[in-house]
Image (cartoon, helix red, strand yellow):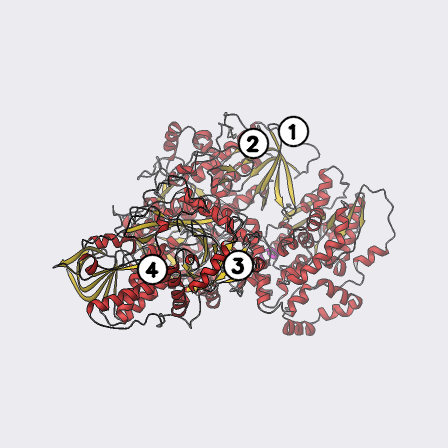
């Protein structure tokens, strides 16, 4: 048993985690974090087959870790148990492997983006995907962008300085293949604050593989990132990311779940920052440009589970509250239900939607024109559940800086 | 981000201190490793149930008993906070809870006897409205309801003990198809299920005939969470009699409601609360604490403030840790702890010994302003205060004083903070609310 | 007053007594067993949980070693469901002499104990938490055994063959006539009445109490209760039995047992098999010794400490109890003391209980002038479930397939309501009896949640006067507390605080109505401490004895 697994000893069986677990509220297919984590772990033997399959219904949101008063790493216990479960069953199912390969999917589909999008978003192929692969036909899948973020970045003319600082931007698969505008906004906001942005070689952070129990492949991707980002970290350059999932993976999830404690892993982890975390640090040092234009509107901010797992608070809220006229309401809901790739799966789609319903209701009832959330998969789920747009906080900052024109519904709402 | 006041711990004491500070205009943040005592305790507010601890007879007037306690044990946390602050803290608590949608009744002058999950009548001071009707069980007939498939409540046992105390009561078990299908694992999930009208109807149908002729009906505390009021009123309408809740094994739904109500209220007052933030280090400048660091992914997150309140909750809350060699350590700030000199005197061989176990009375020694003291009796830091179960000297679970002690010392700590704080000290670059 | 007439009266409801009852009943004798508390209340329910391969005894006590390996095979065949096939390691740590390994291996061969030397790397692969600096490792067929389950299975088999098993029946007198024991007068503790039992042969299988029982017939049997302390760690540090490869001493065995692992043990003569304490130094010693084999052991969450007393039989007085042989002794009091109708079986260890029972019933046969063969070495026990060994995950698997997570009464140890109700209906008198049957309260929360739930079920099921249910609750809280005080620190202390919140804060159990009663059925063993030995705690490596 490793360090993470030994934290099961801290469990005092108090049931607080059971009270907050979002999937356990919606279904009894998941017996709850206390049961699936520290309790079941006492009955699992490394060299014996996994005795419990219900741990697969954990959605990896990590709310349990946050509310646990004694520091049991419940989510990690579950993730490890799930990986072993798949190993015992003879490997990770094809569907899980496909869902785990966001970068590969991106690279294959990107050259034929319009066709790929058509295939992902028509009823017939979705029905087939549900029947053959177990991806729910209603699940919110993104659309491939014709131009990747990296292509955009490489084609733009070099910016002159002067630069006070420099960062390496970790774009992640979603920004690169589906939402390059998030990366574009990030670059704009950073440059506005005198920060030079480089985009080093990088690959998928491997979180989808970790979440789907494919630790072997995840390890290869993670090691590759350590190599690619290693020199950046060694040079003392900060790595910033707009996907709270990617940055959490580099900071903690990958080294912990895979049991990697090398100096390279530690360096990259220490160097990695969520973008809003980084910007807030600039603010605290008095170096953030606070010349924001007014944005007189009200928005609901939803802190993704994976941001809460960073344990750095909600820096996006602090930043957005610097914008004159902007009212930021926090959702105060634990989870949108998507759980990365969890809510895409046929057997889990309804659970995901059930988990997210209170959040959807909150957003709809508040009457706001849009919600703001740092995680791409959460945004897709929120759009799916509310019918309203959802953007990354950096986009709001970009609007307030005047770098990017807000969409029409914002302009209308602020009138 | 710099806060005026940083409260460590989100239990009763932490919430009490933070609410008081926030209401007075201080920019307040609560950092908590996790969620705590609210979710384990019953949801009522004890002030003093038995004095001396272990007496057979319950205290009738908590005010009088606390006065007596303060005379006999001035170093007890109630002695530090004082009656006046206790009184004020209880009123403040009621106001905050009400603002958060939960009504509490009661007065410092009189304890009320409620019903425990074992059926024992038990004194407490402030009563959540949902439990109020329990006070009447000595008169008339009470029906106690259990739900088939719910393992955390046994109406037969409750009734048997009520009868032994001279109360007329009968048990009934409701068989609810929804519960059979959905099989909720904890009380919180069952409480959420009961927010559905159809599920409530099953419950009413299941017990309506048994409840006929009763003067009141007692339920395990699962009558809704956010929509608790609606659930209770609906049941009363459907059954035609007052209903009351009896607390259950943890998780305490009543406590969960209370925490959420107080949390909402705190945020409304401009406060910030972060769960999942464990204090692991600190920075001091001489006798002034400058900041604390919380454990974050791949780093320590720094929090600066002008004043700090340690409300980390004794051994149970994780604020104190005991080592095998007999040492006791305060975990957030490493403050000196008052504890029995060695392990051999920690425990009484009888588990329910009335004077309790000496080690559980270990904790921080504080002055009248709730500042933690060193061995010489001087405040360790000039800007640190402490409240709640982390304090030394209380025998909480036998005195039945947990919540009152937390609220009183929380408020006293906040007063100490505010006495030294001045709104004009706030810097101009700080973030507006 | 009730009267019973039988061929064989067995005194003692531990592994040996029930083993004798089964064997006698299978051989066609009318058999009655009396036990003053619940089955396994004595040493059988307080031991290490080890099915010996015999490796521990090969060097210094080869007779015991041979007995052990023979019975190891028999028990694996006849009660595999009570045994987890963990295998065992004997490890040479940096504190030990590697050369001893050769002596060990040779002695194993001599005694017929299978022993294979494996590389430390292989051992670490199988058990990653072993001390990485171990020098040599030997694999032997040790296993982990559930003595509660085994004893109950044996008792059930005895009943199936016509025996009567009477728990909560305490022997008050041995009835003698013309120098022959004719039976006993026992007191039924539940019904509070005496029972006269007439028997042709009385078997004294009362373990550490054997001296006291023999005394009732005027026979002097020097049984020294040898106290052994054990400590359970909250999770399975290892899944293999791990022994120190050196001469036997304190704290040199770690046994994975169900969801915990148990380290033991110490060895101190105590005057009284019922009253002894657990000292801080004993716990410290065990944890420190465990640390040598398994780094991190002493910092892990300690769940509980308890002690059992070995029945050590020795004709002469001994200075150190570790010197007493662990083999068993059958005493025919007719030959030895001129008292007919009584035999005593004493000494021994759990692993050899069946053989002890066999020789005893052989003696019964001789004394009754008949020859009836023993079949217990081949006849499997009930509920063998296809002859499979117990596995740790099987309980969790069962709950998964039946989807009965919400039915758990003891969540820590995965005990469902059905099983608890079954045990209550079968006549458990206290929650401690339930614990022995199903492991109620033996997990991390030490009864925090399941005590209340079980009392609730008890009350609902049995409709007893509520004072009885209340007493059951208070008694069990006290029973759990006994094993906690010596080890409460860190996380377990935090747990004890939550348990206080529940029972004192929430339930107000300190104000439960018990009608002034004290429970007549519950015996609290530990009321006095054991003085530390004059030279201080035994240090590892010094031979306290053999």
Mark toward the start of the polypeptide (4 vs 1): 4
Picture layout, residue C139 above or below residue A190 = below
Callout 1 secondary element: helix
As measured in the structure, the alpha-carbon distance from the residue carrying label 4 to the one carrying label 3 is: 32 Å
Horizontally, residue C207 falls left or right of residue B357, namely: left
Label 1 Cα neighbours within 10 Å, binned few <14 / some 14-19 / many ≥20? few
> Would you name the residue on which mark 3 appears?
A24
- Asked if marks 4 and 3 touch (Cβ < 8 Å), the reply is no
Is A262 left, or right, of B220 in this rendering?
right
> Which chain does tag 3 point to?
A
Q: CA distance from mark 4 to mark 2?
A: 56 Å
Q: Which residue is mark 1?
A: B425
Q: Which mark is residue B384?
A: 2
Considering the whole magenta stretch, tell me its main secondary structure: helix
Q: List x then y, in percent, for residue C323.
A: 36, 50
Q: Nearer the viewer, mark 1 or mark 2?
A: 2
Asked if marks 4 and 1 fall on the same chain, the answer is yes
**Which is nearer the eye, C94 or A346?**
C94
Depth check, mark 4 against mark 2: the one in front is 2
- Split into 4 quadrants, where in the image is the N terminus of chain C? bottom left
Query: Mark 1 near mark 2, Cβ–Cβ under 8 Å?
Result: no
Work out whether mark 4 precedes mark 2 in sequence or the reverse, and give the earlier one: 4
The magenta segment is A357-361
Query: Disc 4 is attached to a residue of which chain?
Result: B
What residue is pinned by disc 4? Answer: B210
State yes or no: discs 4 and 1 in contact (Cβ < 8 Å): no
């Amino acid at each position: 048993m490793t360090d993470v697994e030994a934290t099961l000893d801290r469990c005092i069986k108090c049931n607080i985690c059971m009270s907050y677990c979002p999937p356990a509220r919606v279904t009894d297919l998941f017996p709850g974090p206390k049961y699936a984590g520290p309790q079941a772990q006492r009955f699992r033997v490394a060299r014996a087959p996994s005795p419990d399959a219900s741990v697969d219904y954990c959605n990896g949101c990590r709310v349990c870790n946050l509310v646990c008063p004694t520091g049991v790493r419940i989510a990690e216990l579950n993730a490890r148990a799930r990986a072993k479960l798949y190993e015992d069953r003879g490997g990770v199912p094809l569907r899980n492997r496909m869902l785990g390969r966001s970068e590969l999917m991106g690279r294959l589909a990107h050259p034929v983006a319009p066709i790929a999008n058509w295939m992902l978003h028509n009823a017939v192929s979705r029905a087939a995907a549900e029947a053959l692969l177990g991806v729910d036909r209603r699940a919110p899948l993104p659309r491939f962008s014709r131009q990747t973020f990296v292509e955009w970045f490489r084609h733009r003319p070099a910016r002159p300085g002067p630069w006070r600082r420099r960062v390496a931007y970790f774009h992640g698969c979603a920004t690169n293949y589906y939402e390059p505008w998030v990366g574009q906004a990030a670059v704009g906001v950073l440059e506005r604050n005198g920060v030079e942005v480089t985009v080093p070689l990088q690959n998928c952070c491997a979180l989808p593989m970790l979440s789907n129990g494919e630790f072997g492949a995840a390890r290869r991707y993670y090691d590759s990132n350590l190599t690619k980002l290693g020199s950046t970290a060694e040079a003392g350059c900060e790595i910033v990311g707009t996907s709270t999932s990617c940055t959490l993976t580099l900071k903690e999830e990958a080294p912990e779940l895979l049991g990697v404690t090398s100096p390279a892993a530690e360096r990259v982890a220490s160097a990695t920052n969520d973008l809003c975390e980084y910007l807030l640090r600039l603010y605290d040092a008095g170096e953030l440009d606070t010349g924001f234009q007014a944005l007189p509107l009200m928005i609901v901010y939803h802190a993704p589970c994976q941001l809460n797992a960073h344990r750095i608070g909600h820096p996006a809220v602090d930043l957005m509250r610097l914008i004159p006229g902007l009212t930021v309401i926090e959702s105060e809901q634990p989870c949108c239900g998507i759980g990365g790739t969890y809510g895409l799966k046929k057997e889990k789609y309804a659970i995901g939607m059930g988990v997210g319903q209170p959040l959807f209701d909150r957003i709809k009832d508040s009457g706001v024109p849009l919600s703001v959330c740092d995680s791409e998969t959460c945004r897709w789920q929120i759009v799916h559940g509310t019918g309203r747009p959802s953007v990354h906080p950096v986009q709001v900052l970009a609007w307030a800086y005047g770098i990017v024109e807000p969409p029409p519904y914002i302009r209308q709402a602020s009138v | 981000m710099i806060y005026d006041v940083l409260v460590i711990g989100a239990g009763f004491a932490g919430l009490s201190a933070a609410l008081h500070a926030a209401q007075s205009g201080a920019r307040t943040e609560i950092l908590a490793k996790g969620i705590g005592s609210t979710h384990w305790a019953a949801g009522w507010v004890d002030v003093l149930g038995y004095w001396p601890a272990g007496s057979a007879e319950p205290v009738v007037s908590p005010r009088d008993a606390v006065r007596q306690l303060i005379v006999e044990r001035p170093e007890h946390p109630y002695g530090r906070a004082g009656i006046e602050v206790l009184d004020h803290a209880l009123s403040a608590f009621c106001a905050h809870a009400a603002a958060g949608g939960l009504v509490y009744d009661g007065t410092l002058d009189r304890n009320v006897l409620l019903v425990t999950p074992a059926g024992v009548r038990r004194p407490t001071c402030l009563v959540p409205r949902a439990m109020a009707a329990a006070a009447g069980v000595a008169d008339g007939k009470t029906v106690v309801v259990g739900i088939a498939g719910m393992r955390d409540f046994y109406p037969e046992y409750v009734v048997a003990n009520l009868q032994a105390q001279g109360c007329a009561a009968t048990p009934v078990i409701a068989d609810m198809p929804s519960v059979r299908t959905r099989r909720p694992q904890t009380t919180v999930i069952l409480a959420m299920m009961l927010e559905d009208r159809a599920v409530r109807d099953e419950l009413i149908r299941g017990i309506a005939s048994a409840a006929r002729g009763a003067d009141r009906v007692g339920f395990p505390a699962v009558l809704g969470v956010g929509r608790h009021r609606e659930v209770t009123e609906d049941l009363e309408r459907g059954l035609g009699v007052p209903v009351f809740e009896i607390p259950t094994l943890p998780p305490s739904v009543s406590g969960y409601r209370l925490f959420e109500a107080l949390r909402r209220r705190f945020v409304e007052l401009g406060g910030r609360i972060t769960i999942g933030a464990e204090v692991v280090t600190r920075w001091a400048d001489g006798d002034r604490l400058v900041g604390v660091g919380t454990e974050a992914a791949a780093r320590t997150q720094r929090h600066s403030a002008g004043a700090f309140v340690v409300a980390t909750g004794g051994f149970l809350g994780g604020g104190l840790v005991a080592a095998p060699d007999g040492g006791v350590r305060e975990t957030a700030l490493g403050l000196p702890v008052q504890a029995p000199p060695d392990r051999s005197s920690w425990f009484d061989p009888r588990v329910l010994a009335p004077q309790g176990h000496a080690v559980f009375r270990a904790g921080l020694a504080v002055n009248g302003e709730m500042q933690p003291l060193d061995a010489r009796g001087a405040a360790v830091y000039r800007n640190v205060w402490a409240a709640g179960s982390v304090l030394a000297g209380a025998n909480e679970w036998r005195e039945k004083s947990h919540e009152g002690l937390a609220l009183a010392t929380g408020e006293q700590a906040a007063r100490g903070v505010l006495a030294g704080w001045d709104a004009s000290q706030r810097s101009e670059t700080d973030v507006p609310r | 007053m009730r009267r019973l007439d039988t061929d064989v009266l067995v005194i003692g409801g531990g592994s040996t007594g029930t083993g004798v009852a089964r064997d006698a009943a299978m051989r066609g004798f009318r058999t009655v067993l009396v036990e003053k508390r619940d089955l396994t209340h004595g040493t059988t329910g307080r031991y290490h949980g080890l099915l010996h391969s015999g490796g521990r005894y090969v060097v210094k006590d080869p007779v015991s070693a041979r007995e052990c390996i023979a019975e190891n095979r028999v028990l694996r065949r006849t009660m595999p469901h009570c045994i987890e096939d963990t295998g065992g390691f004997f490890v040479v740590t940096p504190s030990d002499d590697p050369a001893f390994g050769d002596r060990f291996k040779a002695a194993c061969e001599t005694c017929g104990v299978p022993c294979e030397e494996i590389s430390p790397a292989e051992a670490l692969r199988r058990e990653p938490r072993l001390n990485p600096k171990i020098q040599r490792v030997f694999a032997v067929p040790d296993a982990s055994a559930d003595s509660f389950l085994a004893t109950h299975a044996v008792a059930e088999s005895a009943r199936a063959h016509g025996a009567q098993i009477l728990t909560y029946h305490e022997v008050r007198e041995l009835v003698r006539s013309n120098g022959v024991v004719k039976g006993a007068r026992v007191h039924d503790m539940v019904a509070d009445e005496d029972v006269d039992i007439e028997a042709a042969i009385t078997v004294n299988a009362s373990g550490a109490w054997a001296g006291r029982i023999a005394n009732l017939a005027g026979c002097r049997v020097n049984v020294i209760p040898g106290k052994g302390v054990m400590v359970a760690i909250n999770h399975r540090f290892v899944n293999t039995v791990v022994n120190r490869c050196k001469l036997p001493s304190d704290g040199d065995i770690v046994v994975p047992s169900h969801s915990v692992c148990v380290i033991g043990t110490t060895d101190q003569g105590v005057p009284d098999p019922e009253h002894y304490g657990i000292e801080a130094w004993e716990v410290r010693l065990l944890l420190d010794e465990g640390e040598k084999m398994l780094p991190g052991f002493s910092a892990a969450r300690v769940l509980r400490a308890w002690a059992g007393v070995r029945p050590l039989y020795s004709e002469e007085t001994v200075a150190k109890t570790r010197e007493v042989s662990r083999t068993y002794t059958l005493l025919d009091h007719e030959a030895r003391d001129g008292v007919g109708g009584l035999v005593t079986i004493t000494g021994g260890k759990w692993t050899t209980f069946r053989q002890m029972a066999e020789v005893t019933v052989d003696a019964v046969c001789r004394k009754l002038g008949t020859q009836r063969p023993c079949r217990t070495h081949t006849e499997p026990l009930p509920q063998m479930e296809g002859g499979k060994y117990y596995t740790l995950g099987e309980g969790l698997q069962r709950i998964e397939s039946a989807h009965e997570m919400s039915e758990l009464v003891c969540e820590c140890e995965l005990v469902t309501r059905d099983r608890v109700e079954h045990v209550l209906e079968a006549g458990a008198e206290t929650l401690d009896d339930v614990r022995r049957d199903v492991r109620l309260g033996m997990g991390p929360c030490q009864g925090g949640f399941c005590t209340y739930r079980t009392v609730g079920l008890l009350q609902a099921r049995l409709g007893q006067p509520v004072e009885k249910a209340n007493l059951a609750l208070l008694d069990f809280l006290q029973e759990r507390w006994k094993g906690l005080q010596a080890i409460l620190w860190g996380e377990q202390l935090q747990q004890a605080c939550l348990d206080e919140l529940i029972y004192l804060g929430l339930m107000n159990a300190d104000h439960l109505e018990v009608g002034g009663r004290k429970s007549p059925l519950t015996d609290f063993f530990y009321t006095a401490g054991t003085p530390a030995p004059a030279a201080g705690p035994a240090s590892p490596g010094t031979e306290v004895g053999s």
